[in-house]
Image (spheres, coloured by chain):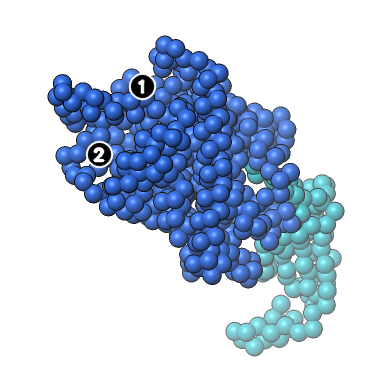
Chain colours: A blue, B cyan
Amino acid sequence: MKKYFLALLALPSLAFADEIVSVINGANTAWILVATALVMLMTPAGLALFYGGLTRSKNVINTISMSLGAFAVGSLVWVLVGYSIAFGDGDIIGTGKVLLSGIGSETIKGTIPELLFVAFQGTFAAIAVAIASGSMIERVKFSTFMIFVALWVSAVYAPVAHWAWGGGATLNFGEMDFAGGTVVHINAGVAGFVVAMILGRRKDYGRVAIKPFSPVLVALGAALLWFGWFGFNAGSELAADGVAASAFLVTNVAAAVGVIGWIAVEWLVYKKATLVGGASGAVAGLVAITPAAGFAGVDGAILLGFIGGVLGFIGVSKLKPMLKIDDSLDAFWVHGLVGIWGSIATAIFVAGYATPKDYDMIVQLVKQVQAVGLTVVYSAVATAVVFYIASALTGGGRVDDETEAKGLDETVHGEKALNL
Amino acid sequence: MKRVEAVIKPFKLEDVKDALAEIGITGMTVSEVKGYGRQKGHSELYRGAEYVVDFLPKIKMEMVVNDDMVDQVTATIVEAARTGKIGDGKIFVSDIEKIIRIRTGETDAEAV
């Protein structure tokens, strides 16, 4: 979703006299249909296994259920109100497309059916809130989280998407966010962090060893995320063209270099090359390239991904212990911190093909910082508000101590991850 | 009658079992246990958080033998289970008051 895309949207009204008729492009539509399915896979498979493998064995079912539930509730809320707020007409928030009113199979957005655009963007909303779940696991109530998903997608995700991509003018600073650096990753990372602060630490945090259920599932989940990310980044071009191909390639390069960056530093510091670290490095590299996917070249992708991987490692192993906030699965550090790096650095690594004639890096850097700042502040405040509402509606947002000690799988879901 | 309990390294189980079979010990009970003594645990690393694992996996084998067999049994276990490195385990010998074979009702020496 390029900023420049907005300029194109304005064209039909300006050129009305020339009778420019939008038509559906079959190749673009085919690619975005596939890309949407790829991004869908990221939440109930990729993130579910990535997070499910990182949590403790007594909370695996609960953690995976949160990804599945986020996708289910997020998808529903998106077509009810989310899409209207994000992509309806309006300055501060969009309106007029509640229940997708006025959108039929013949309605066109750019060169693809608008219904396909609705579906594609819905997968972004759902994964954003699922990413945030990683900060809350092992103690948040399942009911609280499900209500939080509905509120957060409507009141936090959709407005931020509207400002960056949906046509909001006042709060759009002219940032470059190709596939969701601010909208998805910073937004989700900050949201998770704020909820982790409100919930408080897990009883066991910092007291006993909290060991992942299965690094094997973590690696498989990261691989599925990586796979789906091609749809996320290359699909955000909304066309099957050269920019989509470039986005596809730099996405793969950044993820690969993210693995190398994380493991390399881990080896230097701990003399171990862990699989969980490698998998996390891939995700960090992917987060870093996301806002830049349609602008950066391979050289930029290498630096974005490598520094993303290194920064992710430093965040979770060095900065996190200083703050003493129990961001359980490091959603803030891997998505928020690395997302901030990617969003700001997007202005630095603009490849020749994507550079506007009068491009001024300093001016663009300021715009990037403004957009990051707005996202951080809005996400923090609005997330706190909607989480307090969700807590109040469910009689407190945190499970009781006994449930926390036994694990949420057995107590909340009546299932176990493994029956041996 | 004595009970011989031996806590050994897991990978030594087959060697010890075979050595005991050669001297006529045909029955035993084995459990997978965790513990530590002088051997230090190992550390595991997840996303930069390092955890020291104190309890190491061990095998506990239990068998009941007649008094005249005790020395031979313990010597056999020591020989078969020893690696010479710290963490080889320990053997405990204690008295048994009574044994009953459930199938036949035989007691004590007949039931060993």
Q: Which numbered disc covers residue A183?
A: none
Numbered disc 1: secondary structure: helix
Which residue type carries mark 2?
A: Glu
Residue drawn at the location 71% of the way across and 29% of the way down:
A268
Residue A334 position by quadrant? top right
Residue drawn at the location 61% of the way across and 58% of the way down:
A199
Residue B50 position by quadrant? top right
How packed mark 1 is, by other alpha carbons closer than 10 Å (few <14, some 14-19, many 20 or more), is many
Q: Chain of mark 2?
A: A
Whether residue B26 is situated above or below residue A98 in the rendered picture: below
Which residue type carries mark 1?
A: Val
Q: Quadrant of the C terminus of chain B?
A: bottom right
Q: Is residue A415 left or right of residue A334?
A: left
Q: Is residue A57 left or right of residue A70?
A: right
Q: Nearer the viewer, mark 2 or mark 1?
A: 2
Q: Residue B93: horizontal and vertical position, in percent?
A: 83, 70
Give the CA separation, mark 2 to mark 1. Answer: 21 Å
Q: Is residue A297 visible?
A: yes
Which circle's residue, 2 or 1, is located before the other in the chain?
2
How packed mark 2 is, by other alpha carbons closer than 10 Å (few <14, some 14-19, many 20 or more), is some
Q: Which numbered disc covers residue A114?
A: 2
Q: Residue A110: horizontal and vertical position, in percent?
A: 26, 30
Q: Quadrant of the N terminus of chain B?
A: bottom right
Per the image, the residue denoted by label 1 is A243
Q: Nearer the viewer, residue A212 or B97?
A: A212
Residue drawn at the location 71% of the way across and 46% of the way down:
A323
Whether residue A20 is situated above or below residue B91 in the rendered picture: above
Q: Chain of mark 1?
A: A
The residue at the far bottom in this view is: B105
